[in-house]
Amino acid sequence: MPHYMIQVAYTPEGWAALVKSPQNRIEVVRPAVEKAGGKIETGYYAFGEYDVVIIAELPDNSSAAGLAISFSAGGALRAIKTTPLLTPDEAVAAMKKAGATGYKPAG
């Protein structure tokens, strides 16, 4: 099953709600991920550009996009970024395919 890195950044209002009522949002969103046919492998809170990082398995891109839309529609996020992840074997296969295309860069 494909893996995705989901990064979210809260709005100031989202943070205010969490300060008022602290909770582990990774556990709160777990049922939504599972309902989409996936599972959360791990999740972390962070500081910097994004506030939460989740690594999840999901059935396909449309499931990942559906979750991103659902999370965004809640209104507590200022940004969400979903990145498809490749295993090392998938990355090597992609490199081999890239070499077989015959593409020649300009110049």
Image (spheres, rainbow, N blue to C red):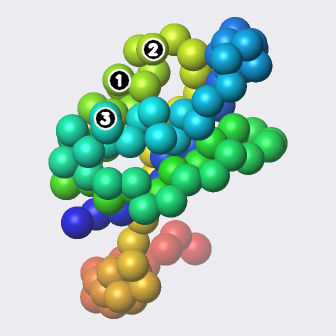
Q: How far apart are marks 3 and 1 (CA)?
A: 9 Å
Q: On residue 74, which mark appears?
A: 2
**Up-down: is 107 above or below 61?**
below
Q: Which amino acid does label 3 sit on?
A: Ala
Disc 3 + disc 1, Cβ < 8 Å: yes
Task: Answer few, some or many: residues within 10 Å of disc 1's Cα (few below 14, many 20 plus, some between 14 and 19).
Answer: few
Report whether residue 22 is seen.
Answer: yes
Q: What residue type is labelled 2?
A: Gly
Residue 47 lies, in percent from the top left, at: 80, 43
Q: Earlier in the sequence, mark 3 or mark 1?
A: 3
Labels in figure, total: 3
> What element does badge 3 sit on?
helix
Q: Residue at x 31, y 34 (%)?
A: 32
Q: Which residue is drawn at 45% across and 33% down?
A: 28
Q: Which amino acid does label 1 sit on?
A: Ser
Front residue of 107 and 81: 81
Q: Which residue is drawn at 73% across and 47% down?
A: 46
Quadrant, the N terminus:
bottom left
Disc 3 + disc 2, Cβ < 8 Å: no
Task: Answer few, some or many: residues within 10 Å of disc 3's Cα (few below 14, many 20 plus, some between 14 and 19).
Answer: some
Disc 2 + disc 1, Cβ < 8 Å: yes
Q: Mark 1 points at which residue?
A: 70
> What element does badge 1 sit on?
helix
Residue 44 lies, in percent from the top left, at: 63, 52
**Up-down: is 2 above or below 105?**
above
Front residue of 23 and 37: 23
